[in-house]
Amino acid sequence: MAERPFIVGNWKMNGTRSMLSEARAIDRASQRLMKVEVALAPPYTLIHAVHKEVEQIGVGAQDCHPAEGTAHTGDVSAAMVLDAGAKFVILGHSERRQGHGEDDSMVKSKAASAIAAGLRIIICCGESEAVRDAGEEESFVLGQIRASLPDDLDNAAATLTIAYEPIWAIGTGKTPSAENVGAMHRAIRALLVQLYGEEHGAAVRILYGGSVKPDNALELLGADEVGGALVGGASLTAESFLGIVLAAAELPE
Ligand code: PEP
């Protein structure tokens, strides 16, 4: 893999200022683990505070609105999260697709807006258990990615990360086998090469997400074409998140 592994913590709807000490601890330890790119996506309310606390790790948002501004009560634009200190935004997480009815075309317009504002994007994709049971996971995931990507991505390798997160593995303690993860990541890689050419398509990082923990991280991160992890529950304490970062640091370069 050309790039350093990328380990991203998604704090979801967790975190008050009392959790800044966890961000600080993650940041300090990451300064000694430069082989790994580490980032946190706290809730909107903590983006600026985390950004001010950390020196090494990246800070991102968990979503943004597709519009540039004005009358959208309760929403937050890409320019606003950038201004708060975010460098990237997670888009199309299954909890937003399911809980907020976001479809691929909504993810695509959010992605275009985020890139126009100067953010990197992490586009999430992943099948339900029913889709996997029907043996349709690969076509489903590739279809989701095709339909969620913005048109005319100039420098895909620098701007885009894909996170493959089977819905049935999120927060459940269940994970696919490393072979299954590798098979899906190889299929995603082939699509990216088809869309962006050999050089850029091969350099886009594809993260695995879904019940990654310190004790399974090495195996999942070692699967084919896995360029890092998107971590939910295990990113909420420095102790468990750093266990995953340490596993990523052990991967052969
Ligand atoms: C996630 O929601 O992005 C996620 C991967 O959650 P968890 O690690 O808790 O399964």
Image: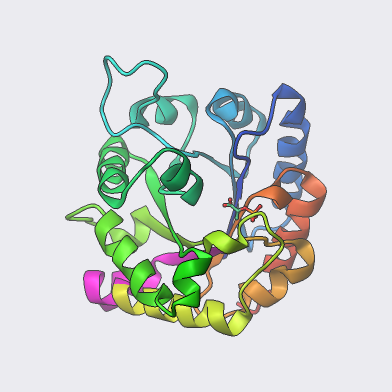
Q: Is residue 119 left or right of residue 179?
A: left
- In terms of depth relative to the viewer, which is nearer, 177 or 52? 177
Q: Position of residue 83 (x, y in %)?
A: 42, 25
Query: Residue drawn 23% across and 56% down?
Result: 153
Q: Position of residue 169 (x, y in %)?
A: 61, 63
Query: Residue drawn 30% across and 35% down?
Result: 117
Query: Residue drawn 30% across and 52% down?
Result: 104
Task: State how the image is colored.
Answer: rainbow
Q: Is residue 141 left or right of residue 113?
A: right
Query: Residue drawn 52% across and 64% down?
Result: 207
Q: Quadrant of residue 174?
A: bottom right
- In terms of depth relative to the viewer, which is nearer, 65 or 51? 65
Can residue 31 be seen by looking at this rendering?
no
Task: Look at the picture and state if 60 lies above or below 74.
Answer: below
Q: Which residues are magenta?
A: 192-208
Count of labels in the image: 0
As drawn, which residue projects farthest toward the left? 152
As drawn, which residue projects farthest toward the right? 239
Q: Position of residue 179 (x, y in %)?
A: 58, 85
Task: Look at the picture and state if 200 lies above or below 22.
Answer: below
Task: Look at the picture and state if 158 lies above or below 190.
Answer: above
Check the picture and name the quadrant holding the C terminus: bottom right
Q: Position of residue 145 (x, y in %)?
A: 33, 62
What secondary structure prevails in the magenta region?
helix
**Magenta segment: does it hold 201?**
yes
**Magenta segment: does it hold 142?**
no
